[in-house]
Amino acid sequence: MAPRDFIIHPAEYDLDRVIADIHEIRRWNRQRFEMEQLTAIVHEDQSRALCVGYKDVTADEFWARGHFPGRPLMPGVLMCEAAAQLSSYFTQRYNLLDATVVGFGGLEEVRFREPVVPGDRLVIAVERVRVRPRAMIVCRFQGLVRESIVVDGIIKGVPLPEDLFPAARGAEADGVAAS
């Protein structure tokens, strides 16, 4: 994958047109609190099997103080986690894997090209490469800051056993402790 080979060109989506906010993302993804790595979804295209979302990176991120003191850099593993969460959102929303919960299945050919720092908006695009229902989904992904590709690679999602996750209950499912 050439660095300038966009999955979807930035001119094809509008970052100001949010189609799914954090509450809608939570309908499909189970991550909460500091593990939520998506801020919004701004583009979905079922015919091209792709989705675009973003993470607003702030100085309050749990990793900012220690990675690295005086010059915080977003850990690469969290860039990959953001891509995994976007892939999971799209997979679950359109029932591509026929699974209750999608987990990380693997990464291939990941390249980190530029740093991401607090104040950046990390825009992520995922595109389905192939899917075997109830087995695995494979997606190509890219992360951009402005129009520069900062990370790209291949990500795999697999169904996780339902019995690992208790049924969501009311406010707890939205990340609010029950009183």
Image (cartoon, rainbow, N blue to C red):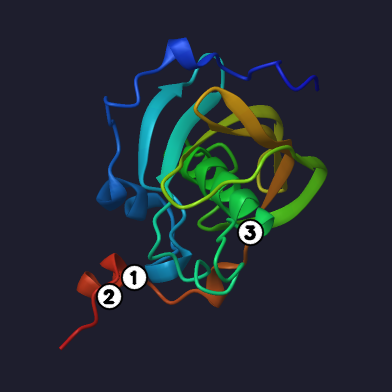
* Marks 2 and 1 in Cβ contact (< 8 Å): yes
163, 22: nearer the viewer? 22
Q: Name the residue at 49% across, 74% down.
A: 165
Q: Name the residue at 51% across, 43% down.
A: 86
Q: CA distance from mark 3 to mark 2?
A: 28 Å
* Marks 3 and 2 in Cβ contact (< 8 Å): no
Q: Name the residue at 21% across, 72% down.
A: 171
Q: Residues within 10 Å of mark 1 (few under 14, many from 20)?
A: few
Point out which mark residue 168 bears. 1
Which sits earlier in the primary sequence, circle 3 or circle 2? 3
170, 117: nearer the viewer? 117
Residue 66 in the image: state x and y as whole percent.
57, 74
Q: Amino acid at mark 1?
A: Ala
Q: Amino acid at mark 2?
A: Glu
| Circle nearer the viewer, 2 or 1 | 2
- Outermost residue toward the top in this view: 11
| Circle nearer the viewer, 3 or 2 | 3
103, 98: nearer the viewer? 103
Residue at the spot of label 2: 172
Left or right of 143? Residue 27 is left
Q: Amino acid at mark 3?
A: Pro
- Outermost residue toward the right in this view: 109
Residue at the spot of label 3: 75
Residue 134 in the image: state x and y as whole percent.
66, 48
Point out which mark residue 32 bears. none
Image quarter of the C terminus: bottom left
Image quarter of the N terminus: top right
Q: Name the residue at 67% across, 54% down.
A: 76
Left or right of 113? Residue 30 is left
Element assignment for label 1: loop
Which sits earlier in the primary sequence, circle 3 or circle 1? 3
